[in-house]
Structures are given as structure tokens and as C-alpha cells.
Amino acid sequence: MNSKNICVVGAGYWGKNHLRTLNDLGALCGIVEKNREVLEEILKQYPNIKGFASIDESLNDESFNGYTIATPAETHFDLAKKVILSKKHVMVEKPLALNINDAQELIDLAKKYSVKLMVGHVLLFHPAIIKIKQIIKSGAIGNLQYLYSNRLNLGQVRTEENVFWSLAPHDIAIFQYFTETYPLKIQANGSTFLQKGIADSTLTQLEYKNNIKAHIFVSWLHPFKEHRLVVVGSGGMISFEDSLEGKPLKLYSKGIIFNNKIPEKVDGSVELIDYEKKMPLTEELSCFINSFDGGNISSVDGFHALEVVKILAEASRQL
């Protein structure tokens, strides 16, 4: 069997991106979509792939050895479990599951059946995020002190999960990637306006070892789009504006020093940092495909996804 026979589950907004990207990579072979009209449209667009109305129907076909799941979060566990029990590799969009027990079960099953379980923390494949990690590791900004991320927009409002579960997995995964450790302390507050019991705006504070602090602000009830990441070190600072034109990444030679016990501002240069303009989803799906032949997925495997789910669960418990 060709090691690049991938079936996509779900042809919604993000699933269509999976379809297009896998097709460009020469790996798209099937689609599972329960909406018949949508399924027919997809098969017109990609006439050489197979279409199915259910995951069970697709699993009866031996053509595939890998699946990507791009469906609502509450369906991830059941769909991924069926794929793993069929001994097929699977990439699940974030979050892996909506509770810790389900996430752990998927990890255990993937190990039992010797299949790859990868989770779609796509921003870990963003060249700017990779560049920031390199800058941190190089010591160019000194010791890591503080991180914050704002992920704000008007919509896309979910009815099955709160804004923290919907948007914050990106930022939690990035912070885990930067700090290489699990937070010692998690504090969260949220506000609910649109739907009972579903937070629309949350602010979560995280504390890591070595006195590293962080916060994540997410909202789908905001007048404009803002995706901002700031990293503060003892010897410099970094900002990444993912929602601005050109997606600028900047390195600041700025900070505070004490002169005779008096704090003074160091207002140095601001450098625009160049980074590769690769598409994160293309890099992510290529990584999944390459994992079939032994490629490394350690930064986005089930274990790291479980850490993200644990942080999500603890923060949500406080909302």
C-alpha cells in the first residue's frame, strides 16, 4: 500500500484546508462527510478520491492507512478511537479530546496497536514560532521571564465548547514548547454573555519553574482580530503579530536595569526578524505523512497533547 493514502474526516471550514493541502501533497485519497450535499460537492472538486458518509463505511475500505480528523472537538475521541482500533495512523485536530481520561485512552490505544497519534497543534509548525524558540535557546534575550498571548476576534462562536477550549490550545501548546515544562500553577477567570455555561472570554495565568510567568487572553466577543504573542527575557524581548499584514516578528533590545538601586529603562534597537514563509498546515501534514516511515512527531504526539488537555481541564474547572 502506498504510504500516503490519507482520508480526511470532516469537510467543514478547517477540513477543506486539509483536503486542499493533502491534495497538493499528493496524499489525498478519501473524504468522510455526513452531509450528503457537501460530500457531493467535494467529490466534484476532487473526482479521483473516494467519498463516504460515515467513518465506519470508510474503515471497511482497505485503501487508507492514515486519517486526519477535522471535526468538532466533541467528536474527536469517538472518531479517533475507531481509527486507532482499525490500526490506522491518525492526526486529530486540537484538542485531542475534551477530558483527560479520553485523551489518555487514545494514547494507550495508539501504543497498543503501534500506530501514530498526532495532534493538530498547527502553530508549532509556524516558521515564526520555530524562529522564536531558536532565539530563546540561543540566549539572545537572556533568561525567559514572561510570556503572553492575546487571541481575540468577533466569532467564530461555538455552541459545544467554551472559548478557552476553542482558541487557547494553540497558545498552551506554544508555551509548553517554549518553556519545555508543565506549569506549577494555573489560575483562570472567565465571562459568559451569549450562552449559559459557555465562557466567551477568559484570562488564564500560568506559572512555570524558574519564576517564568505567562498569561493567555482569548475572546470571540471582540471588535477586531488580534493575534499577538510577546516574549520577555532578562536581556531582550520578542513580539509576533500574526494578525497584522506581513506577520512581523520583532526583536527588541529593551528592558530595565538597576543603576545604584534605581530602575532605568534601556530603550535599545528594534530589529525585524526574517523567517521562512512556509505554510504551517503544509508542514504539519507533511510531518504526519513522514511519520508513517519513522519521521519524528515528538513535539505534537499524544503525550504533549495530553499536557495541553490537562491544562485546559484545570483552567476550565475554575471558570
Image (tube, rainbow, N blue to C red):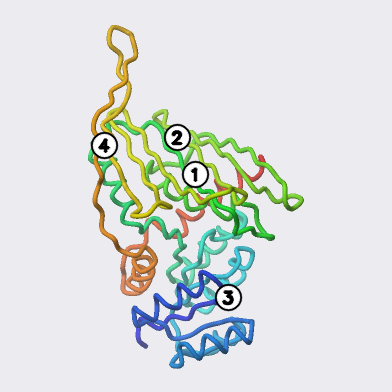
The picture quadrant where one finds residue 260 is: top left
Q: Residue at point 42% right, 37% down? A: 147
Residue under label 4: 270
Q: Image quadrant for the C terminus? A: top right
Residue under label 3: 82
The image position of residue 232, as x and y in percent, is 36, 33
Q: CA distance from mark 4 to mark 1?
A: 21 Å
Numbered circle sitting on residue 150 = 1
The image position of residue 252, as x and y in percent, is 28, 35
Q: Amino acid at mark 4?
A: Val
The picture quadrant where one finds residue 39 is: bottom right
Q: Amino acid at mark 2?
A: Tyr
Q: Does residue 196 sit above or below 187 in this rendering?
A: below
Quick one: label 4, few (<14), some, or many (20+) residues within 10 Å? some
- The reply to whether dot 3 and dot 1 touch (C-beta < 8 Å) is no
Of residues 208 and 154, the one nearer the viewer is: 154
Q: Does residue 105 sit above or below 59 in this rendering?
A: above
Mark earlier in primary sequence (1, 2): 1
Residue under label 2: 208
Q: Nearer the viewer, mark 3 or mark 4?
A: 4
Mark earlier in primary sequence (2, 3): 3
The image position of residue 32, as x and y in percent, is 56, 82
